[in-house]
Image (tube, helix red, strand yellow):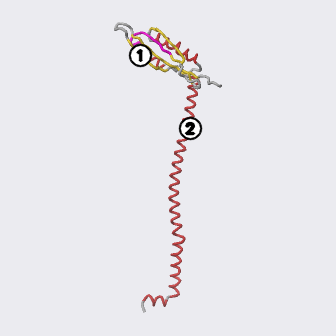
Amino acid sequence: MSLARRILGEKRRIVIPLVVALLVNIGVYGLVVSPLGRKSANAAERAVTAAAARQTAERDMASAGALVQGKARADQELATFYQKVLPSDSDEARRITYARLPALARKANLKFTTRNTSNDTQSKKDSQFGRVRTRMVLEGNYQSVRQFLYELETTPEFIIVDDVALQQAEMDKALQLTVEVSTYYRQARSGN
């Protein structure tokens, strides 16, 4: 008789319960502990993924908040521009260019030759804005032309320089500056 059979025969009361307990432990491990361990590991992975998703969502929320705040600030600045900077009608727009341009020319020591002011016919009837165009011809020396253009570009009124042409008919004659400017104004909408 072998040693294993002899031990099994003599210690049967102890060995059988130990084998049964071992089988029960293996069964419990296979049916309960192992699935719970995998479930716990999956829960940890899901927690890491959820934390990353939360951080992404917080960044998106902060970005959206900044966008809303920026849009509100832009809307406020645009409203200020419409109310305080942009002329309210074509008459006010004409007054800006009518008075301001000759004053700038005098300040720069330029001789005022001609001026032509007109409402832009390209403005659409359903547009919120209209445009007044002014074309002026001035004469003077180069330094005066530079000073005039600087003053025109830095004037607080809403005047846009569309075109500048500089020519001199003869070498000893004054320079001739032709400047075309525009200013926009709020126009009443049809149907209001």
Is residue 156 in sight in this rendering?
no
Q: Which residues are magenta?
A: 134-147
Answer whether residue 137 is magenta in the image: yes
In the rendered image, the vertical position of residue 145 relative to residue 19, given as above or below: above
- Disc 2 or 1, which lies upstream in sequence? 2
Q: Which label was assigned to residue 1?
A: none
The quarter of the image holding the C terminus is top right
The quarter of the image holding the N terminus is bottom left
When asked about the image quadrant of residue 4, the answer is: bottom left
From the top left corner, tell me how far across and down residue 66 is, in percent.
54, 39
The extreme right residue here reads: 192
Neighbours of disc 2 within 10 Å: few (<14), some (14-19), many (20+): few
- Mark 1 highlights which residue? 165
Residue 137 or residue 73, whichever sits in front: 137
- Mark 2 highlights which residue? 68
Gap between marks 2 and 1 measured at Cα: 44 Å
Residue 119 or residue 54, whichever sits in front: 119
From the top left corner, tell me how far across and down residue 118 is, in percent.
53, 15
From the top left corner, tell me how far across and down residue 37 is, in percent.
51, 66
* Residue at the image point whose x is 53% and y is 83% from the top: 17
Asked which secondary structure carries label 1, the reply is strand
User: Of discs 2 and 1, which sits in the foreground?
Assistant: 1
From the top left corner, tell me how far across and down residue 40 is, in percent.
52, 63
Residue 13 or residue 43, whichever sits in front: 43
